[in-house]
Amino acid sequence: MADIFTQMVDDIYTSPVARAATYTPEGGVAAAVRVLRIELDPLVDSGTFSHVGKGAILAVRISDVAAPAIGDAVAVGGLSYKVQAKPRFRNERALEWRLDCAAA
């Protein structure tokens, strides 16, 4: 039986809050996943200037995508993205990846 935190994350990803998406590893096979849009068109701050980037911060369950990498593709809601930075854990229990994506 899953612990309460895993169950809560699973409940969010099966709810209408999550969106159906297709995740395709670079050179790999596409898979149907569910994603959360954390932020659309994130603010990019270089220290000298700031601008709104064309992309999204997406979250995906680690149980759906074991090893995301720079260059992988995500299609959601008719939009296409490429992972542009090293994926990182979204929470301390390592249940979700946070993906910094650029519009493809």
Image (cartoon, rainbow, N blue to C red):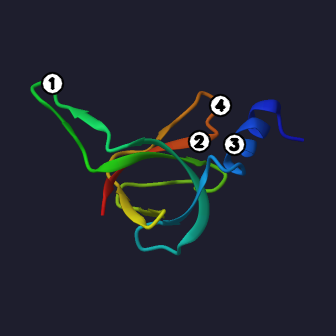
Q: Which residue is mark 3?
A: 12
Mark 2 lies on a secondary structure that is strand
Mark 3 lies on a secondary structure that is helix
Residue at mark 2 to residue at mark 1: CA–CA distance: 28 Å
Q: Which mark is residue 71?
A: none
For marks 1 and 3, the one nearer the N-term is: 3
**Which corner quadrant of the image does residue 19 belong to?**
bottom right
Residue 94 x/y as whole percent: 61, 36
Residue at mark 2 to residue at mark 4: CA–CA distance: 8 Å
Label 1 or label 3, whichever lies nearer to me, is 3
In the rendered image, which quarter contains the N terminus? top right
Contact, CB < 8 Å: mark 4 with mark 1? no
Amino acid at the residue labelled 1: Gly
**Which corner quadrant of the image does residue 64 belong to?**
bottom right
Residue at mark 2 to residue at mark 3: CA–CA distance: 12 Å
Mark 1 lies on a secondary structure that is loop
Camera-side residue of 24 and 56:
56
From the viewer's perspective, tell me whether residue 98 is left or right of residue 43. Answer: right
Q: Which mark is residue 47?
A: 1
From the viewer's perspective, tell me whether residue 33 is left or right of residue 75. Answer: right
Q: Is residue 23 above or below residue 40?
A: below
Q: Which mark is residue 96?
A: 2
Amino acid at the residue labelled 4: Arg
